Amino acid sequence: MSYHRNMDRTLPHPETSEIRLDQVLHALADPVRLQIVCDLAKASEEVACSSIELPVTKSTTTHHFRVLREAGVIRQHYKGTAKMSCLRGHDLDELFPGLLASVIEAARKNS
């Protein structure tokens, strides 16, 4: 996995070419992670992780965000003390056209 590093707290993300379908599907298969993805899809800009209400503990929430980031589904960075997240929609559409939109639409229909 390639890492983007600078002087502040930077989180590791896979390069677009390193994103694998099996890891993306695994990340999207969990209901809590799917809720995170749907919430991020509704947002017009990056969102603080703490602003997404989830039915799990803070440590479990951190785990779910990490799985999504390491799979290449989301991008995260620190803004002050807040960890900001956004979907990597463009990257995923480049690799797997229509996958993310289809998964989000199916999740919305089932909720």
Image (cartoon, rainbow, N blue to C red):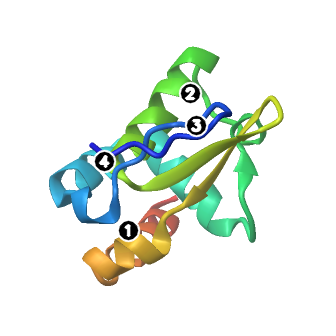
Q: Quadrant of residue 41?
A: bottom right
Q: Residues within 10 Å of mark 2 (few under 14, many from 20)?
A: some
* Circle 4 or circle 2, nearest the eye: 2
Q: Are marks 2 and 3 in contact (CB under 8 Å)?
A: no
Tell which of 105 and 40 is nearer to you: 40
Upstream in the sequence, badge 4 or badge 1? 4
Q: Which mark is residue 103?
A: 1
Amino acid residing under circle 3: Thr
Residue under label 2:
61
- Is the residue marked by circle 3 packed among few (<14), some (14-19), or many (20+) residues within 10 Å? few
Marks 2 and 3 sit apart, C-alpha to C-alpha, by: 19 Å
Front in this rendered view, residue 5 or 76: 5
Q: Are marks 1 and 3 in contact (CB under 8 Å)?
A: no
In terms of depth relative to the viewer, which is nearer, 79 or 29?
Answer: 79
- Given contact means CB atoms under 8 Å apart, are the residues at marks 4 and 3 in contact? no
Q: Which mark is residue 73?
A: none
| Distance of label 1 from label 2 (alpha carbons) | 21 Å
Q: Earlier in the sequence, mark 2 or mark 3?
A: 3
Q: Position of residue 72 (x, y in %)?
A: 37, 53
How far separated are the C-alphas under marks 4 and 1? Answer: 10 Å
Q: Residue furthest right?
A: 80
Tell me the tag on residue 29: 4
Residue at left offset 54%, top offset 61%:
87
Q: Amino acid at mark 4?
A: Ala
